Image (cartoon, grey):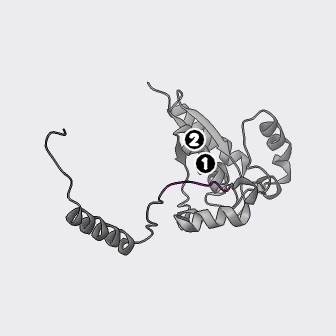
Amino acid sequence: MTARHVVVDGSNIATEGRSLPSLQQLDEAVRAFLAERPHDICTVVVDATFEHRIDASERATYDEALAANELLTPPAGSIGRGDKFILEIADRANATVFSNDSFNDLRALHGDKAVWNLIEHRPERVARVTVDADFPPDIDTIEDYQRMLETERRMTIAHPIQSGPHR
């Protein structure tokens, strides 16, 4: 069987059906998943507040799991709890996300909104680059897309592409 990489939304799974997360519940869920899919690779991510929200009796086990790289937390200064970090790992590893979260906060970010969010919150990760070329049109809406198609259609009529042998 081919191994698949799965990124587990640990905070979400640990809080399922409860008001505060349980490290024991998370551990049981991951172990049950791996028992069914022993060839898969699991990366378990919990948000930065996780250790402060679990029961005090689980904190030593949490510290051990973190030290053993059994759990990952987003780097300091990450935007939006652990969701973005989870999705970045999954994207880079071509992995599946194991969660019941719909990631509503992040689904709303696309196009210019996502870029401006990055520029605003992580300016150290942004660089200006001079490009000596025409930029493609900015298409954010269906209307923008339809305008671009109409412009392309007009350009094709005004300057038809020549077919046939080139001499």
Quadrant hosting residue 16: bottom right
Say which mark, if any, is on residue 92. 2
- Asked if the stretch drawn in magenta spans residue 70, the answer is no
Residue 17 in the image, given as x and y percentages of width and height: 61, 60
Q: Residue at the front extreme?
A: 167
- Asked if the stretch drawn in magenta spans residue 132, the answer is yes
| Secondary structure beneath label 2 | helix
Q: Which residues are magenta?
A: 128-133
Q: Residue at the bottom extreme?
A: 143
At label 2, counting other C-alpha atoms closer than 10 Å, the crowd grade (few under 14, some 14-19, many 20 or more) is few
**Circle 1 is placed at which residue position?**
88
Q: In screen coordinates, is 86 left or right of 108? A: right
Residue shown at 66% from the left, 51% from the top: 85
Residue shown at 13% from the left, 43% from the top: 164
Q: Are marks 2 and 1 in contact (CB under 8 Å)?
A: yes
At label 1, counting other C-alpha atoms closer than 10 Å, the crowd grade (few under 14, some 14-19, many 20 or more) is few
The main secondary structure of the magenta stretch is loop
Residue shown at 23% from the left, 61% from the top: 159
